[in-house]
Image (tube, helix red, strand yellow):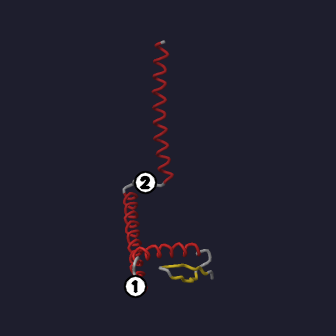
Amino acid sequence: MPQVNVEINGRSYRLSCGPGEEEHVIALSRRINAHAESVGKGSTPAAEAQTLVMASLLLADELKEAELKTAELTEELSSLKNAGVGGAPDERIAEMEQVVSEMLDKAAAEIEAVTGILENSV
């Protein structure tokens, strides 16, 4: 099992992780460390546990906000589907192609009409 060295709040830790997860674990530890540094500035080593608790709370708050946003977007998507907005992507593309085709046909007919008027007036 691979191991990585991470540094959080000035301390090094050797952690085991799954194969291929090394960079992910390091990135997560950097995120935790950034929060620990932001709340632990000027704190004493004795306050290390409190600093890590505060960093954990900040991360938990970020997670909760992301979960709420995901729930909102899921609900919005569901209501759009129920309202008949959207449809399958292929169906929507076909509908848009049909509308564009009709618009081009109409424009072509108008251009032909104007061309006919110009030819007759010359």
Circle 1 residues within 10 Å: few <14, some 14–19, many ≥20: few
Q: According to the image, label 2 marks what residue?
A: 86
Q: According to the image, label 1 marks what residue?
A: 47
Count of labels in the image: 2
Percent position (x, y) of residue 35? 43, 74
Of the residues shown, which amino acid type is indicated by label 1?
A: Ala
Q: SS at mark 2?
A: loop
Percent position (x, y) of residue 120? 48, 14
Circle number at residue 60: none
Residue 24, above or below 3:
above
Query: Mark 2 vs mark 1: which is more N-terminal?
Result: 1
The residue located at (62%, 77%) in the rendering is 19
Query: Among all residues in the image, which is located at the extreme bottom?
Result: 46
The residue located at (42%, 81%) in the rendering is 52
Which is nearer the eye, 37 or 113?
Answer: 37
Of the residues shown, which amino acid type is indicated by label 2?
A: Gly
Based on the displayed image, in which of its 4 quarters is residue 60 positioned? bottom left
Percent position (x, y) of residue 46? 41, 87
Residue 59, above or below 79:
below
Residue 5, above or below 71:
below
Circle 2 residues within 10 Å: few <14, some 14–19, many ≥20: few
Percent position (x, y) of residue 83? 36, 56
Which is nearer the eye, 121 or 56?
Answer: 56
Which is nearer the eye, 48 or 55?
Answer: 48
Residue 82, above or below 65:
above
The residue located at (49%, 80%) in the rendering is 10
Based on the displayed image, in which of its 4 quarters is residue 78 positioned? bottom left
Quarter of the rendering occupied by the N terminus: bottom right
Label 2 to label 1: alpha-carbon separation = 53 Å
Which is nearer the eye, 111 or 35?
Answer: 35
Q: Nearer the viewer, mark 2 or mark 1?
A: 1
